[in-house]
Image (spheres, grey):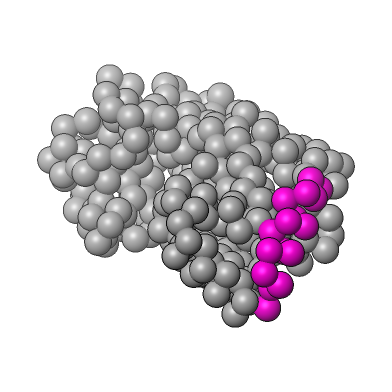
Amino acid sequence: MHRRELLRLMGVMALAGLPDGLWAMQHRADDGLSEGHRLITVGGGLTETVFALGAGDRIVGTDSTSTYPVAAEALPRVGYQHTLTIESLLALRPHALIHDGSAGPEGTLTRAREAGVRILTVPGEPSLEGFRARVRTLGQWLDATETARRVIDDVDQDLARARDLRAGFPRPPAVVALMAHGQGNAVAAGRDTKADALIRLAGGRNVFTDFAGYRPVSREGVMAKRPDALVITGAAAADFGGMLGRVPQYVGDTLFLLGFGPRLGEAVLTVTRFLAGESHPRRDARFTDIPSP
């Protein structure tokens, strides 16, 4: 680390009430996450999981995507998950920062690590198995393995209900997942995304599998795929929600649908019920009313 950068970090640490050097040396040597450790969590689903495991009182700061439960909204913010700043992190005197691979930039994480903050990464795969691995890992770190098992069991029970429901589908419905990006521009979810995994768990078929990740999409591009249903996050509804006529639409909260935290089973069951036509205010038709081609 350059001398100027070191002096700047020492200044931040001093403002945070940390003895120069002592804090960093002490917590580099400490391998556990005891109840007294101060945590920063990055990623809404991860933050929600830590709360569900009974360790929410250890969190001293979160990123801007951590909006659930209500207690998470009251915590200090350290910025957006991809654009964290070293000052916002060290000002909270954390022992560890936990993320799923989404935290950045890397330079900020490197400087935090050099200042003595443990940077812990949980599995971040956008899948059901990724969810289970994250919960189990956090349960081990937080000495909450039994609670972690219960969280996974609760999700599995909702997934079983969803499987029973989708057994009545005449075919996998063609689904488009739309969400806001940047300045509110809507993007469609391709393969290798949480939205794609959600659609498949709900018994649907993502029509945009010719690309990975998220891409901007036009109204015409969506309609060309002849979707049976749309799953839209609230922020994207203003762009696309009213533009696609009578295509059945589910409009939901981004963290609820894509957090892949303790409410994953509930989210999958909700979308499965929507596709089955059970009940949703934005539904104009039922997928099960649409004849197979």
Residue drawn 62% across the image and 48% down it:
119
Say which quadrant the C terminus sits in: top left
Q: Quadrant of residue 286?
A: top left
Q: In the displayed image of the protein, which residue is found farthest to the front?
A: 3
* 19 sits to left or right of 169: right
Q: Position of residue 267 (x, y in %)?
A: 56, 46
How many numbered callouts? 0
Could one spot residue 70 in this view of the protein? no
Residue drawn 21% across the image and 38% down it:
222
Q: Position of residue 288 (x, y in %)?
A: 42, 33
Out of 141 and 133, give the one closest to the viewer: 141
Q: Quadrant of residue 237?
A: bottom left
Magenta-drawn stretch contains 18: yes
Q: Position of residue 145 (x, y in %)?
A: 84, 41
* 110 sits to left or right of 151: left
Magenta-drawn stretch contains 173: no
Q: In the displayed image of the protein, which residue is found farthest to the left?
A: 220
Out of 234 and 110, give the one closest to the viewer: 110
Q: Position of residue 80 (x, y in %)?
A: 44, 61
Image height of 63 relative to 259, above or below: below
Image height of 165 relative to 34, above or below: above
Out of 31 and 168, give the one closest to the viewer: 31
Q: In this picture, which residue range is highlighted in magenta?
A: 17-32
Residue drawn 23% across the image and 32% down it:
226
Q: Quadrant of residue 112?
A: bottom right
Could one spot residue 36 in this view of the protein? yes
Residue drawn 16% across the image and 44% down it:
218
